[in-house]
Amino acid sequence: MAKILIHDEYVKSPDKLIKLCPFNAIEYMDSKLSINSGCKMCKLCVKQAPEIFEFVEAQIRGIHKEEWKGVAVYMDHVEGNIHPVSFELIGKARALAEKINHPVHAVLMGSHMEHAAEQILKYGVDEVFLYDDVALENFRIEPYAACFEDYILAHKPSIVLVGGTTIGRSLAPRLAARFRTGLTADCTFLDVQENTDLDQIRPAFGGNIMAHIHTPNHRPQFATVRYKIFDAPEMIKTPFGKITKCTLDQSLLKSQIDVLEVHAKEKSESIEDAEVIVVVGSAFKKKEDLNMAFKLADLLDARVASTRPLIEKGWMDAKLQIGLSGRTVRPKLIITCGVSGSVQFVAGMKGADQIMAINIDKEASIFNTAHYAIVGDIYEVLPKLIERIENERA
Amino acid sequence: MEILVCIKQVPGTTQVEIDAVTGVLKRDGVASKMNPYDLYALESAMILKEKYGATVNVMTMGPAQAERIIKEAFMMGADRGAILSDRKFAGSDVWATAYTLAQGTRKFCKPDVIICGKMTTDGDTAQVGPEMAEFLDMPHIANVLKIIEVTDAHITVEMDMPQTVEVARVKFPCLITVEKGIFQPRLPSYKLKKATAHFNIQYFALKDLEDQDEMKYGLNGSPTQVKRIFPPIGNDAHEIWEGNSDILTHQIFESLMRSKFI
Ligand SMILES: Cc1cc2nc3c(=O)[nH]c(=O)nc-3n(C[C@H](O)[C@H](O)[C@H](O)COP(=O)(O)OP(=O)(O)OC[C@H]3O[C@@H](n4cnc5c(N)ncnc54)[C@H](O)[C@@H]3O)c2cc1C
Ligand SMILES: Nc1ncnc2c1ncn2[C@@H]1O[C@H](COP(=O)(O)O)[C@@H](O)[C@H]1O
């Protein structure tokens, strides 16, 4: 049985040892150290105090990895409109499949899906497995899981990639539990070894730690990946793959769930949830000029936020203020436009993954924080950038 | 109605850092706390209790100190509490955690609705709920935005879908995971603290569960293994772009394209 052994006889300062664990899983009671159920087997303790903590390997459960062949992608869609993350995953699946000489499969379920299935072939998959039935019109967990299970039982894929959408994150765990196998959520890096083991890297602890995870003794290996992590492949002119229609007994397509209504989604108003933010600062001379920022934000699917002075002027809503006395944001991208970069402002946004700052003054302190310091006039750069993106879209 | 809420104790901060060279963890000694997302699950249960009448059971898998969060739940209005605690649960990944919770549920109560938080701040997977539903053979709805109505046999909710919001009615028993913001969580009350001080907390170890196969719990029951953990590679780009606005526009545009914002 795999575990971490503790050599109590060498323990000198238990307080220090307890602190080695980020998950508070090391306990000291009755002058004995022990490991509680908070343990995630990250083995940091083993690494840092090898004289005390020893990792003992589990006996390996025998599986025949060679019986599992194929890299499968779940095709996420709403009413036949495939979510772009699924195409990105086809690109990744192809790269993995080539290394281990496996086929790439797409698994599609829904109602009236022929057109979508044809479209998928253009992204270069070997086979689309299509479950087309009116019972599959809306996403409901039991029938969707039943189709997926049917595919896995019939074709035994080694790797299954699922988009990290609300559907994918609901469906993938259901299947992983059913097949008694591992699922790694929100992977940001995937590679495969010759023995078909999938190397998965994902952020943990709110992105403060990266974890390298594998599933050595179970198949299939499930991973979910969010949108815009990998690149979608180029479309091919002459698809080589085929569509295989699959059917399932109606009794397996039953659900305890009735979908009563479907409506369009309201956009979240809060800047804390935004992945991309455009910030307006005091450089805007008139309230109307803010339209440049709103237009850019529209094109980037971003939210507009503000420094404090514009709130004080009454141009922007107080809920949109970033900073010490406003909100703290951590978007993927923030573009500040005419913001000086006071400490109070920077306190609320320095954790952004990518910071682009446009300021006319080369000495502006925002440039100390920015990854890309753009020395320029917002009244020139913003209109040109908007035009450039609009041309690209046209 | 019988409700079960799954809650977890998590480290008080996610601001942990690993030294890139020594691999040593740097953190300040902030105590553990209830997973903030589970407060929304608890609040949802309390609202249902007030509106329709219900027994609210809370359960956690964790060390004995997790008692703190069970007591906190009592102070918000929970009626019964259980802790699944055993050294043999150490090293559980999602599969083993969900399996243990499902086994614990069978021993602890007979819920019509199980409510989980959207995710934990330390595990951060949002998968435990759906996996648990699978083991208990009940339907689940993840990412619930709103609870609309409860009848004798159904709960009707709004679920968050990739491009839409759907209203769905699901039969009991079922499991839902709720989004943050579904309700504003109440504060623990001092009055309830006194009133619930004598409440018992039930403890379950592996020997108390139906399935006692050790290969399904803790590290042995975990299909995924952590190979190593390491600090994230930060964005340490620091470029200064100068020139006329055409050049700047071109540079910004290319950069946005490269990082897929356009
Ligand atoms: C206790 C306290 C709390 C505070 N909390 C906050 C807070 O939460 N959030 C907050 O934002 N502020 C806060 N402040 C205010 C803060 O100190 C700054 O005054 C504020 O952030 C400055 O906003 P700004 O950058 O928009 O304006 P400015 O500092 O006036 O900067 C404008 C910038 O625009 C540039 N510029 C001008 N014209 C152009 C052009 N045409 N093109 C490009 N660039 C141009 C200038 O070079 C300048 O750098 C707080 C202050 C205090 C004392
Ligand atoms: N150890 C645990 N004990 C009780 N509930 C848990 C535990 N781990 C996860 N959960 C529940 O599952 C949800 C999702 O957790 P996670 O999959 O870790 O992000 C949490 O919000 C809790 O409701």
Image (cartoon, rainbow, N blue to C red):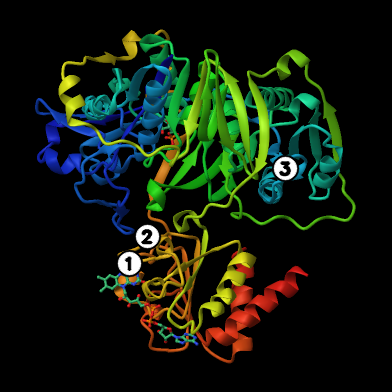
Q: Chain of mark 1?
A: A
The numbered mark at residue A375 is none
Q: Secondary structure at mark 3?
A: loop
Quadrant holding the N terminus of chain B:
top left
Q: Chain of mark 2?
A: A
Please state which amino acid type lies under the numbered disc 3. Answer: Asn
> In this rendering, which labeled residue sits more in front, label 3 or label 1?
1
Q: Which residue is mark 1?
A: A347
Q: Residues within 10 Å of mark 1 (few under 14, many from 20)?
A: some
Q: Position of residue A243 (x, y in %)?
A: 86, 36
Q: Is residue B173 above or below residue A175?
A: above
- Is the distance from the Cβ of mark 3 to the nearest ligand 2 atom less than 8 Å? no
Along the line of sight, the residue nearer the viewer: A271 or A213: A271
Give whichever of discs 2 and 3 has the lower sequence position: 3
Q: Which residue is mark 2?
A: A328
Please state which amino acid type lies under the numbered disc 2. Answer: Thr
The residue furthest bottom is B244
Q: Which residue is mark 3?
A: A101
Assign ligand 1 to one image quadrant.
bottom left
Q: Position of residue B15 (x, y in %)?
A: 30, 52
Q: Is residue A194 above or below residue B210?
A: below
Quadrant holding the C terminus of chain B:
bottom right
- Whether tag 1 and tag 2 are in contact, CB under 8 A, the answer is yes
Q: Name the residue at 41% across, 30% down.
A: B44
The residue furthest front is A314
Disc 1 and disc 2: Cα gap in Å? 8 Å
Please state which amino acid type lies under the numbered disc 1. Answer: Ala
Along the line of sight, the residue nearer the viewer: A166 or A289: A289
Disc 3 and disc 1: Cα gap in Å? 50 Å
Left or right of A253 on screen, residue A366:
left
Give whichever of discs 3 and 1 has the lower sequence position: 3
